[in-house]
Amino acid sequence: MERVTGKKPHHFLRRGIFFSHRDLNLILDKYEKGEPFYLYTGRGPSSESMHTGHLIPFMFTKWLQETFKVPLVVQMTDDEKFYFKDLSIEEVERMTFENMRDIIALGFDPELTFIFSDFNYIGQMYRVVARIEKAYTASQVKGCFGFKMEDNCGKWMFPAVQAAPSFSASFPHIFPSGNRLCLIPQAIDQDPYFRLTRDVAPRLGYLKPAVIHSKFFPGLSGSKGKMSSSVGAAVFLTDTPKMIKDKINKQAFSGGGATKGEQLLLGANTTVDVPIQWLRFFLEDDELLEKLQHEYMLGRLMTGEVKKVLIETLCGIVTRHQEARRNVTDDMVKLFSSVRLMGPAKGAQ
């Protein structure tokens, strides 16, 4: 990627946080030949405030947009949360609007970014959804997602809705004609959706979307799997510096020695240490991160010192985000979510 773009790879790439892909090489080959692509990512609004783990795909997607200067579509899966959670439509719509503010605050280009709610945009992309639904069989969906006969019908149909933005035909106001390749940055747990999408794409006359996968962002407890949105397990983008400090100091699992003497003697296990794992995601300085890990492993740094660096790093990120979010007006949300000529369609005027 560095050869193609002429830019230093994002630290998520340098550190293997985004660690596998399908057809990224094809995207880069096409880009070198002057054939553009677009980006697609999404957010399931399950709480009014996003947490730090939710930032990972958006931080990387923003870097991709800035690096390649390409359109981005962001799907807000409010319908999914209605089907899968005990929430009313009104609740998920409110969460969707608030999450849109968080996403816009990250600094995406309004000229190249379309953020849409499934409830609001489904009419425009329903023809594509219908083609996908007809191509999927119930046995395929059951085998891929484990749905049961007692599950509501919305769950069974949702994979087609999530697949539709992978195809540029879903966005005639951005791509008025022709197939465009799509690149989807995603957490690894989203891969089943897009394996199925890639399987049916050729039959529908669409291009297979390329995907790039990230590792899970661990919860404070250090348990395997991705961070949940429960209050005690996450650092939210609405947290105060004091709340962040308390959560890291009291709840972040440490791989350091149980006592100062044990840490001095044995050092820390950085593979299970949550503060070090989080710093791999959020501390951009490679040299400082390497120094912290090395000194901590050798017992020259105490757990509290590593946690202090993490607290300072997170407080900076969250405070800057809160300041940016305060500047996101309702009109800005309406702009980003409006169906308007963008990218290739605007250039063709």
Image: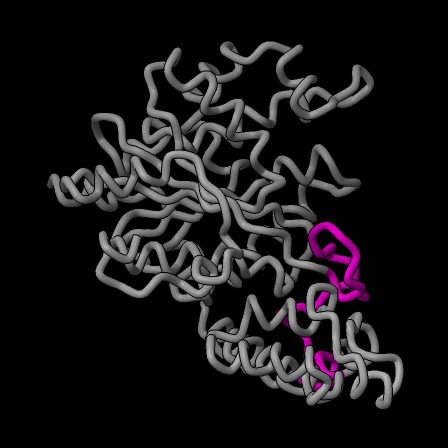
242 over 131 or under it: above or below: below
What residue do we see at 18% from left, 44% from top? 32
Q: Is residue 19 left or right of residue 89?
A: left
149 over 166 or under it: above or below: above
Residue reaching furthest to the front? 265
Residue reaching furthest to the left? 349
What residue do we see at 72% from left, 69% from top? 274
Q: Position of residue 275 (x, y in %)?
A: 69, 74
Magenta residues span 219-245
Q: Position of residue 326 (x, y in %)?
A: 51, 75
Image quadrant containing the C terminus: top left
Q: Is residue 99 left or right of residue 68?
A: right
Q: Decide whether the magenta segment is chiefly helix, strand or loop.
A: loop
Q: Position of residue 41 (x, y in %)?
A: 47, 45
- Give the number of callouts: 0
- 131 or 217, which is in the foreground? 217
